[in-house]
Image (tube, coloured by chain):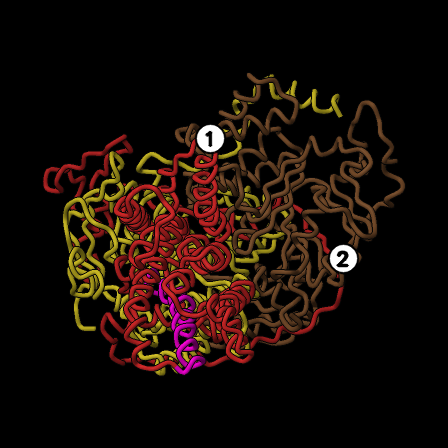
Amino acid sequence: MMPDIHQVGEGQPQKEWAKVPEAPAIMVDHVSKWYGQVIGLNDVSLAIRGGVTGVLGMNGAGKLTLLKIVVGRLQPSQGQIRLFGTDPFKNPAPYHRLGYVSESEKLYDWMTGLDFVTTLARLHGMTRDEAKERAEHVLSFVGLADVGNKEIGKYSKGMRQRVKIAHALVNDPDLIVLDEPLQGCDPLARTTIMNVIRELGAMGKTILVTSHILSEIERITEQIVILHNGRLLALGNLHAIRELLDHIPHRILLRTPDPRELGRTVLPHPSVYGVRFPNPGELIIETNSLSDVHQDLPSLIVKSGVKVTAIENPDDNLQSLLGYLIGGRS
Amino acid sequence: MSGENDEFGLDELLDEVSPPQPLPEPAPPETLPTMAAPSEAEFMGESGAVTGKARMEAAYGTGEGEGQGMAMVAQSATPGSGTIFHQIYRPWRGNLNPRWVRNWSILRHHVYGLFSKGHRPWPMTTKLVVVIVLFGSLLPIISMSIAALTGLDALMTIYGVSRANLWGHILGTFHNTCCWPLLTALIVGGLISEDRQFGTSAIYFSRPVTRTDYTLMKYISAALILSMIIVLSYCAYYAAAIILNNEGWAYLLDTLPFFLVGLVVAFMLFVTFTSIGLALSSISTGRFFPAVAFLGIIFGSRILAFLIKLLFSEDTLYLISPYDNLAHVGQWMMGLNTTYEFPAAWSFVALLLMNGVSLYILISRVNSLEVTRE
Amino acid sequence: MTEEWIIETHDLVKKYGEHLALDKVNLAVRPGATGLLGPNGAGKSTLLKTILGLIALTSGGGKVLGHDIATEGAKIRQRIGYMPEYDCLIPDMEAIHQVRYAGELLGMNSSSAVQRAHEVLEYVGLRDQRYRAVSTFSTGMEQATKLACSLIHDPDLLLCDEPTNGLDASARGFMLDTLFQVVKQGGRSIIMSSHLMDDVERICDRMLMIHKGQVIAQGRIEDLKAIDREIEISVWGGASKIEEKLKDMGQSVRRTGRVMRITRIDDSTYGTIIQAAAESGVQIRKMEDYEPSLEDLFIVIMDRLGYSVKSSRDLLGGETPAMDQAAQLGRKVA
């Protein structure tokens, strides 16, 4: 899963920078970061190649440190990082393909939204007209077209957030890092931004996103990175991670008018080790392999002839996954 | 509508709310075209059902849907252990005291903060300066004690109670340039500006504290702290002179009028300084700017007037200096020879003007102070 | 509290110069938990300040907790707890003293304020940290302190402006539980503004939505939601197989990734879905009647007002040659 860091990209300054073919967009190799005595990130290695990845963890788990290292705001104390196969600390070219929404609320309050985005677009090497055109386009996309000429200082919280997203998107980046992009946005802006993140991810761009709201992450992506106390705890598809935790029994909740009959049909299945009837009309199947049971469940239901009106996995979501992974040792 | 009858609700929703215009003019509800009778089914039919654009993508909806995901877990997990706590909401039905108790708590918050924890956290530097200034203003007492102990009459004439010395204790160059402005700058600097900076104005204005109460109590707190230092040291000086020289009633009758006039002058001093300081505090955020600006006004105006006087032999410009106005009015009230060439009434008017302008700025700025952080 | 309406207003108008912040707002809020919704800049903060009796209205009037908004602001504020969105704590002060001072400003005796401050801080989950200065607190603890400050006098109505903003998952859960307990156990009323519809739905049974200074919806959330006749399934391994299968069986299916919505014709639809899954060998990880959320409601209402959710097409549709050039330029410059 993890290519050897020395095989991709030399990190030597090149005149014409290009992405190293086949290199993951982000490669972090045994990276640690200390702040004095405090450890921010502890020996983290990961490679991210396309798509949207949610970075999760409690406050102080090292999310911000990881993001800051990726966008070049911090240099790792130990270990190396490659963006598109290039060492950004030797050749900063990859940063031209990067968009970053920081968690900071601070913006140039005296600038208008349009000026701000235009200026940042010009930093990417666009001409004045191109930058203006592009800035107007991005601003109208985030729904700020009508207030583009107002000063940022007069914006509400959600509008400031959207200015930040606009400036991150202005250079059409391939790698987008978003730290709490949805904070303070109303549901409309929220859904819009989530849609965009997901669609940009589907287009092959690499997106890192953090959020405190787990259901938001669930709606954006299944691919997650879980950090805890500076360590990488888990990485990958969230359901697959849950399957790996096979010492915690999985539960499947079925709603049916005749739970006992269905229970009898299901119980002989090799992966099922228990059925319970918590409430009338409900059946809980306990298993250690969710996949196996689910694979055969439809045919078992058909065989039993019982009507089933709902199927749920009560503990297969991000909330309970985080609870299982870090709940006991925060 | 099921359950309870909300007079509002669906009607509101069904009413055609005018699309965003610069200044929407909503017609009275009766004249609005109501699309349908307000019932739930109609609401659905009208909107074509709430189809939930948002939630379509929940949880599983983000992958391709074809493959099975892969993952790695760095550490084996421990079973989740939650915390159980028992939250019990305890009601409280005590009486809330009237206005003056609230105001008293604001005053106490500021004044007690100088001495004890749990009230306004004055910075350490401020507390230190307060102590140093207090010591500095007690210097004449020390000199007097030395005079009394050693029996040096010459020293006693320099430091003993006299019109000039009583005036000088409040308005003399040493006290008035070294002690009081510094003290005022540090005490008054952050009083309002920090409320603006930290958003703590919300804790006052979201409670039954009016802006008048707020301004008044801040003013009194600042003035009280200043007066404690100034008046305390002044009284101590006078008392010490009487005790050290074993003076009798005759002396008291002689000097008491001057002493009382001195008190009035002291009152004018800390009122003026508090007004200017609080006005500066109300137009800024943070405690640094008001402090520096206050010192700048006191010293800057004085230095400017002094230079003008040196160059052009014209001292009317001393009218812009709060320090000199106070000194001038003080000299006149004490019956000393004034060191200024224009009448003392001018200085008095200038003082009134300064106070007036400062109070105006203060009141208008506090009125426009946002409830939450700006 | 026996009043039927805790807030009742008629034709509230507030103008800031030309800008109309509140436009003929007619409110009728019952006791209980009410969510205050609206897009950014809709006038939520202005409305909360109006309820606090802090704003000189241009016209209109009303009553909060039986007191007149225009004239009895101080009485209203004695019975309301307000938790602002932004920081409002003195950084170097200890939490316990902060809360006590908040109580004293309401007119509590200092002895009962101290006792009550301990009680309230414990209630919001700050037990051991109450002697620490607020500047050392995490966001969650700061929010809890703010809540304690607003709960100290056991208010009849609690106004919370974005109470869960910036909190991580566990702190957010705790905050919501705490607020829920205030309503459920304490029997107090809450008006809570939030952008997180999940939060509102978890606590509130009523909602109040404003936009551009106007009330555009208010009432019970349940009443406002439509009953949708769709079944949502989430599948695992071969979503297109089951989609085809279901379509062959004559069902109407909408699909996004792994999630599908199937129009529910009658109870046999469930059987059909499971049949299809059995035949195509696809796992159904989740199957339930789809219930529209408050967020759906919000979006539908906003949609009617002419605001819609955008997608990346809007972003990329206008892709200009200039941008491509710039991107190339960026590479060259580097």
Examine the rendered structure and indicate whether residue B190 appears above or below residue C299. Answer: below
Residue C176 magenta-highlighted: no
Q: Residue furthest left?
A: B30
Q: Which chain is yellow?
A: C
Q: Chain of mark 2?
A: A
* C57 to the left or right of A273: left
Quadrant in which residue B104 is drawn: bottom left
Predominant SS of the magenta segment = helix
Q: Nearest the camera: B224 or A297?
A: B224
> Which segment did they paint magenta?
B218-246
C-alpha separation, residue under disc 2 versus residue under disc 1: 38 Å
Q: Secondary structure at mark 1?
A: loop
Percent coordinates x, y for residue C217 in the rendering? 26, 49
Residue toward you, B285 or C82: B285
Residue B89 sits above or below residue C89 on the image: below
- In the rendering, which numbered label is found on residue A34? 2
Under mark 1, the amino acid is Thr
Residue found at x 54% / y 30%: A117
Q: Earlier in the sequence, mark 2 or mark 1?
A: 2
- Name the subunit of mark 1: A
Which chain is displayed in red in the rendered image? B
Colour in which chain A is shown? brown
What residue lies at 44% left-to-right and 48% top-to-bottom?
A: B298
Q: Is residue B184 visible?
A: yes
Q: Can you say which quadrant of the picture contains the C terminus of chain A?
A: bottom right
Residue A48 locus on image (x, y percent): 73, 45
Residue picked out by circle 1: A112
Q: Position of residue C115 (x, y in %)?
A: 39, 82
Q: Which three-letter amino acid code belongs to the residue tagged 2?
A: Trp
Q: Determine which of the numbered discs, if any, sits on residue A88 in the image.
A: none
